[in-house]
Image (cartoon, rainbow, N blue to C red):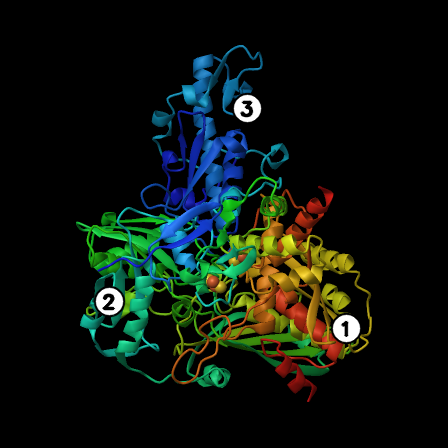
Amino acid sequence: MSLPEPTRFTVNGVEHSVAAEPDTPLLYVLRNDLDLKAAKFGCGLGQCGACTVLLDGHAVNACDTPLWAVSGKQVTTLEGAQAGSTLARLQQAFLDEQAVQCGYCISGMLMSATALLERTPDPTLDEIKAAMDRNLCRCGTQARILRAIQRAARCGAAT
Amino acid sequence: MSAPLKVPPMLSANPRLDRWVKFNDDRTVTVFTGRVELGQGIITAMTQIAAEELDLSFVQVRIVDADTRLTPDEGHTSGSRSISEGGSAMRSACAEIRAVLLAEAARRLDIPADRLVVEDGRITGADRIRETTYWDLPHAELLAREATGQVPPKPVARYTVVGRSTPRLDIPDKLAGRPRFVADLKRPGMLHGRVVRPPSFGAKLISIDEAAIRAMPGVVAVVRDGDFLGVVAEREEQAVKARKAMIAASRWDEQPLPTDATDIYRFIETRETTDTVIVERRDPAALARATRTFEARFSKPYIAHASLGPSVALATFEQGTIEVWTHSQGVYPLQRELAEVFQLPVESVIAHHVDGPGCYGHNGADDAALDAVLLARAVPGRPVMLQWMRDDEFAWEPLGPAMVVKTRAALDADGNIVDWSLDLWSNGHTQRPGVVVTTEPSVSLLAAWQLERPVPRIPQGDPAMSGGGGMARNAEVIYALPNQKVVAHRVEELPLRVSTLRALGAYANVFAAESFIDDLAQACGADPVEYRLRHMQDPRARAVIERAAQEAGWVPHQASDGTRGRGIAFAQYKNGYGYIAIVAEVVLEPEFRVTRCVAAVDVGLAINPDGILNQTEGGILQALSWTLKEQVQFDRERILSRDWETYPVLTFSEVPRVEVHLIDRRDEEPLGAGETPTGPTAAAVGNALAHALGVRVRDLPLTRDRIIAALG
Ligand code: FES
Ligand code: FES
């Protein structure tokens, strides 16, 4: 059986070439081929946000993004947090607020919040809620997550 | 001589001291707990307890949670009992270990043990000249003995680690995205598995074209054993595609269901039941003062655990040995059940707990463990990672049972409650091993019932009242009422698979009782806070009610303007655990929304106060999701709620402000916190809605349609 044509793309600044079927969900490629386990499988249906990653800076569901669609593009996952970045600031704020229960949703939360703060550095509470609406949390951590995102926004404004 | 101390049951069951603590060469210790981390912060709290009793700093203590090779057998981690049961065993074991080591240090240093000081594991006399450490002593020999349980733990007044908010140990990994969950494990040669469940419960497989599936790319094995179907493939997406093809290629003979999501309440009320009187208190003189009577009927649908991640397990099956990595709540019970299914000696099954998506009761974790082993058996020597798909989870996890609750009360001329009764109808709330003892082997694991040679399904059970009960949990109210009668009507016939879900029957029972109390207060023109206090003597209960009201800015007798409402509700979980009162505020316009929840909680000594706040906030928001939105849909054929669109849950836009206030009770026993808020949240919201609307919605969830119907 012949291997599929490799797809080339960049993840967290590193170039990769993966030989998988072009319709393979990006989520499986990240988790299984590249060993980046932060993004989680929650539904595989684009409904829960557990698999959220950034594609050229936009939050997307990796579970319903096929491999072919990322060809030549930049993917950022939670593992790609750089010191001083918005993502790192969010991680710190989540830590300070202890905004985690089981943590299964948290990678997706951090990525969606990063996309929001990159676009809108000083969002209102309603803007945060609207931006996070497609990220579900079953443990009821939302109140803390909202506080953490507000805290990260404040710290961003201070720097 | 003082009376002997009561030995914690988990210590009696696992008496060897070296089963609890091991001293490592690098001046750390490893403690072993049979409790599992479910996202509730238990490993952090246990680490605090061990550090406290051993006089170590928090960072010197490492912890291993449930593992059948390593840790004590503490059954299931459930019912908010981890801190009261597991914590007291850990505390007692560590206190004794410290005493045993100190006795040896005293001999060596020639200083009486009660003059020795321990700091970070260094043992010195007052002179600070002679010293030794735990690690210099022959600790392995000294701990190779059974606990007496007779060493008193450290007095609370001397605590320095316990009672302080401590950042949770598992959070940094989770924020960094480091592999921490079962689904993140990776092994050389690992394959990926998926299962194909029947379209509905009890359906029998008629046919499937296995050859066509085997020919699909990457497929390594197709597993068919009775009505159990699964597939193993080299790559995950190949397993997912093969599963999809198998669903299309399989034909099943389905059984109709006896009821549906609309009919279910009539159904459970009209079945044959086994009735148990939970409490009956009679005071004929008080009854004689009755002037008016009231009645109400409440209902609660089936609710799904619906963890954000579907159940998952990694397994190997090689030369008669099973090894499984699981997010089960109980690795030892799972070990015994797997041994039963595969007819192996218990020692041939090894189960390790690894973190999973949030666990709120008996979900699909154990079922997935068996599925993974069944798939691994088909590919000897190769590890199989099995994850359920979203619809597997919704359609097959054991649900929280539907319930009907009826209340009746009588008031005297002054509005005091002189008679109170509550009747509830439900299936038993558990299908855990060990609750119902059967003469023939039976197991709780889904696939086992489907095999060619099945192991029968464990009978439905209901936790005993001595442990807080199941369906009748919190059915008795702790208000001081002269007459009270509670009867549990247990329905044996099981339309859908059910088992434990956070707080079990307490959710519906507290919703009913605390809604009804408000109805009575209203009927006699009393303020809901004042009315509760009037009937409550327990000072800790009164304290949470008063505190919640005060923090929420409760104004007695405040009338609603027709667009806003506020309500209060109270419960002591299991009538013996944590106390909580919650005030909810709602608005009706532009649409019904909960805007604020203010809670006061008393869980005795809070080992990790921030952990208690986190769990309580989470419990409130999850209960809010149940209360506003959740209901498993099913027709006479099958479950229809199969994804997040057919089973919507709370979204960020619907999240209110949540404020939790902890009442510090350092001198009281620590009590679990995770389940206390569920019923009071539902009732507080229901009461706020009734305050705003002027009419009450008694059927959960409190949806827009129900509100419109109530307005008539
Ligand atoms: S897993 Fe991708 S949205 Fe749920
Ligand atoms: S913390 Fe468990 S799902 Fe969000």
The subunit carrying tag 2 is B
Front residue (pair B219, B551): B219
The subunit carrying tag 1 is B
Relative placement, left or right, of B578 versus B563 is left
**Mark 3: secondary structure:** strand
Q: Position of residue B98 (x, y in %)?
A: 47, 28
Relative placement, left or right, of B473 versus B482 is left
Residue B200 in view, yes or no = yes
State the residue position of label 1: B564
Q: CA distance from mark 1 to mark 2?
A: 60 Å
Relative placement, left or right, of B667 versus B457 is right
Query: What residue type is disc 2 on?
Result: Met
The subunit carrying tag 3 is B
Quarter containing the C terminus of chain B: bottom right
Q: Quadrant of residue A27?
A: bottom left
Residue count near mark 2 (Cα–Cα under 10 Å), binned few <14, some 14–19, many ≥20: some
State the residue position of label 2: B216
- In the displayed structure, would residue B444 be above or below residue B588? above
Relative placement, left or right, of A81 versus B259 is right
Q: CA distance from mark 1 to mark 3?
A: 56 Å
Front residue (pair B196, B450): B196
Asked if marks 1 and 2 touch (Cβ < 8 Å), the reply is no
Query: What residue type is disc 1 on?
Result: Arg
State the residue position of label 3: B119
Identity of the residue drawn at 61% across and 40% down? A84
Nearer mark to the viewer, of 1 and 2: 2
Ligand 2 within 8 A of label 1's CB? no
**Mark 1: secondary structure:** strand
